[in-house]
Amino acid sequence: MTYEEIFQRAKERLLKAKTSDVKQTIAVQINIIGEGHGSFYLKIKDGKMEVQPYNYWDNDISLNVFGGELLFALENKASDKLGFYGDNYKISILKPVLMTIPKARKQQKS
C-alpha cells in the first residue's frame, strides 16, 4: 500500500470522529513506518479536526505505526490500542475522540 492510499483512508476515517466537545488544541504527528512510510498530522482546534499530509513539528502527541495497523485500528474501533507518546493529558482526550469513529462496514463481495 502506498503512503497516499494510507493517508487518504486514514483521513476519511479520522474526519468521522466527533470533536465538537473538544475545547483544547491537540496536534498529533503520525509517522507511518514500513511499507508506505511517510508522515501526516491531525489537529483538533475549536472543536474541529484537520488532517494534512505534512509534518507538525510542534506537536503535543506523536505516533509511530505501521500503515496497516493504523488503518485496522481506525476501521475497527481499536484506536485506544495505539501507542501514542507525548502529553498524557491530551492523549487522554484524544483516545476517546478516536473511539467515536464508527466501525467500517465490510464490503460485499460481488
Image (cartoon, helix red, strand yellow):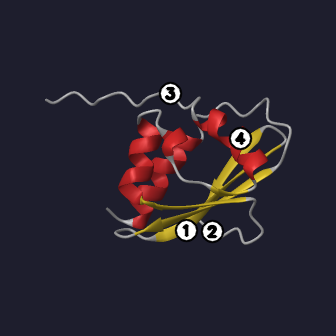
Determine whether the residue tagged by mark 2 lies in a helix, strand or loop.
loop
Mark earlier in primary sequence (2, 4):
2
Q: Nearer the viewer, mark 1 or mark 2?
A: 1
Residue under numbered circle 4: 92
**Distance between the alpha carbons at the discs numbered 1 and 4:** 22 Å
Residue under numbered circle 1: 39
Q: Amino acid at mark 3?
A: Pro
Q: Is residue 72 left or right of residue 15?
A: left
Residue under numbered circle 2: 54
Label 3 Cα crowd, 10 Å radius (few <14 / some 14-19 / many 20+): some
Return the x and y of residue 73 as percentages of the image width and height.
44, 42
Residue drawn 76% across the image and 55% down it: 87
Q: Quadrant of residue 107?
A: top left
Mark earlier in primary sequence (3, 2):
2
**Distance between the alpha carbons at the discs numbered 4 and 3:** 19 Å
**Distance between the alpha carbons at the discs numbered 2 and 4:** 24 Å
Determine whether the residue tagged by mark 1 lies in a helix, strand or loop.
strand
**Distance between the alpha carbons at the discs numbered 1 and 2:** 6 Å
